[in-house]
Image (cartoon, coloured by chain):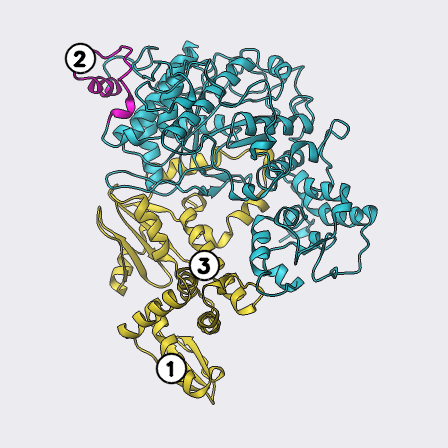
Amino acid sequence: MKIFMCNDRVETKLCCIYTAWECALKVGYDKVGMMVEPVTEPTLFDEYIHVEYDEDHYIKVVRSIRNSISDIAYMYVYYACLSADPDALNKVFRFLRKGFKVGASIIKRLNDPDVMNMMELRRNVGNEIHYFREFARFTSMDSKLYVCHIEPKNNVAYMVGQHFADRMPSEYWMIIDDKRHLAVVHPMDEDTYLRRLTDEEFETLKNTEAKEDEYTDMWRTFFKAVAIEQRKNPECQRSHFPIWMRKHATEFMDV
Amino acid sequence: MFEISNTEAGITTNEKLKILADAAKYDVACTSSGVDRRGKKGFLGNSAACGICHSFGADGRCISLLKVLMTNHCIYDCKYCANRVSNDVPRAEFEPEELCRLVMEFYKRNYIEGLFLSSGVFKTPAYTMERMCIILSLLRNKYHFNGYIHVKTIPGAPDELLAAAGYLADRISVNLELPTAESLEKLAPNKSFKTILDPMGKVTDTIAAHRIAIGKDSRMERSTINRYLAGSIFNSSNYVEDHRKPYDVSDRAKIVPENDNVSGKTGNVSDKTMNVSGNYGAAGGGNETDKIFAGLDKQTGKVLRYDKDFLPMRYGDNSLKRAFAPAGQSTQMIVGATEETDYILIRTSQTLYQNYDLKRVFYSAYVPLNEDAVLPALDTAPPLLREHRLYQADWLLRYYGFQANELLSEARPNFNEKVDPKCDWALRNLGDFPVEVQTSTYDKLLRVPGIGPKSARRIMSARRYGSLTYESLKKMGVVLKRAHYFITCNGRMMFNTPIEEEYITRHLVEDNYKDNWKIEHQNEKYHQMSLFDDFNLT
């Protein structure tokens, strides 16, 4: 079996699918697999091939998904590429094989397990984007720059940034993915962009959350005051606001 | 009163926030849903129709908006309220600019989705309402806040202030508090049904007129599901003709500005316009807000006067496009303070949805705060399970095509505590079941316990391309635990279960028992006794 490996950028993943597809036409669809680097436990009898980003391939893949299947199918694929599921690329591959055969109606065929898998990936990533739209917290540096740290399971920082780009177009802000060392940067009234942080940059930005001011205090005051004692329900609170997400939430930090 | 204002002088914003958030916490209508609005350069904020929660408090309720009172000073003496004039509680009041800064900073940090502004009645309803409008006007026009605002109107406030509030806010609400006039008279002696339903009706009409003016249907958008459900309460053939005909408004003074191009259909439009010009004294003298309102009317140089062209929305370049309460109107009712049955509550809700076109009705389990002969005793537990059942029923009305009289009747006026209203209905109508998922219609599928709008839609589209299995139904989101008693898939039931009321009831009650217990006992602390933790033996 040939395993194609690539880095975790969406564009490269799509190129990886292209290369794997090309190979599958020669050796058979069940003889190829895909993985995201780093591959820590390689198997003995498989062949591992590294795939680099190639703009032509990337454009071809996007174009054929959008033209031959549908825009919604491309959205499914894009979300699946953001997913942290190690098997996501293979799921996309199987979905696309069927998608190119039947066309736009593929996303409705939920009784097909391959389509259901994609729906689950999309739902999982979509839900996480929504979670961070809710629970991302910005800290004010000098009441001009606002910095936010998140540690999402899937690679959703950019999609979360899209929401805030619409919401706060005339502010300076950045969202930092602590796990992947990615930053979504938004300068005032300009376009948002994604960049990989160098170790040095990350070190400087690491501790922004420690900064306290009157508004962090007041937020905690409000958070406590608005709960009704007679209706206390930590279980319900936990199911809506899971504990792993509280790490960067101002109201749950101990001062 | 003067001692209070004396101690108030040196109070910090943090302390004010504590008092005024605490005083507002029993208000439940704080969703941020109902309007989609893109952000724009130079402004702060946008709005998503689905609503966004930002945190969850210790009681598990979502925190979406900065829910505060403008002031908890109140001249009224509503029996159930913590802020009634006869209670000795710390009192405070936000300065308009102070509250605006708080909203802006909280919003930028993504703590909140917007502002929920309510207030105790300070001096007079008109004075209070005017001051609230000043805050909203400042937020929209000076601070360029484009996020969500929900404003509670004060019963008895004049029409032009109601109009001003509606143009500045996204959602406007009047609290019905209690579903019958008798209860209201008993518990809220200073309020009357008239002072509540009157503004509610006017807001409804204004929203309708405004929607027609911009080319929309006069009624609020509802979930698209309702289009496919013949029995839906939002289906015009199902309107109940009540004491008040919807939108027959020819005899009512309307609260839209005359120069608004409203189509003839909405009847005559009075020349009453909104104005926050300080007719009620709340604008004060010589302060910042005064200057803003003065700036509005540079041409004539007159400030505090009644002028139909004098609209706060004209301040700033964008505000003319602002719609009147685009996210609609809502209300809330207290559950458990008086003797009303669930049937009366749910009938009232249905009437409000149909005749007043309310977007939401909220239910608030009564938490005893005051001791009074007409109120439940102080140690009464809040009726949380009952509140939960009412919300479930409310959803059945708005998303599942049920009507109030299908769920309850005069003979059975209260919900079954043991099973949810949908299961309860299904058990009483076992003749309609089992439903074949492969061929049944959308509205029949929706009535199966365990199948919701999303899973029903998935079933509808997936079954065109191949046959369904119980496995795939489960993945589509069907709760088979409840649904399997009521459906067949390709002619087969999941297990060999008899369609028999007693048998299914027994099983459903068992399944529900744990959930119900949790809701009823959510605030009781219990845990396994442990020598090490409880007796400090470590």
> What chain is colored cyan?
B
Q: Chain of mark 3?
A: A
Specify the chain shown as yellow. A
Residue A54 placed where, x, y %?
28, 75
Residue type at mark 3: give it: Val
Q: Residue furthest front?
A: B264
- State the extent of the magenta-drawn residues as a range: B288-315
In terms of secondary structure, where does tag 1 sit?
helix
Q: Which mark is residue B301?
A: 2
Distance from the alpha carbon under mark 1 to that under mark 2: 77 Å
| In the depicted structure, whether residue A212 falls above or below residue B482 | above
Residue A112 appears left or right of B382? left
Q: Considering only order in the chain, which callout, 1 or 3, is on the residue closer to the N terminus?
A: 1
Q: Amino acid at mark 1?
A: Glu
The amino acid sitting under disc 2 is Gly
Q: Where does residue B493 sit, x and y in percent of width and height?
A: 75, 59
**Residue count near mark 2 (Cα–Cα under 10 Å), binned few <14, some 14–19, many ≥20:** few
Residue depth check, mark 3 versus mark 1: number of the one nearer the observer: 1
Residue linked to disc 1: A22
- Could you tell me which residue is drawn at 49 percent across and 65 percent down? A106
Q: Chain of mark 1?
A: A
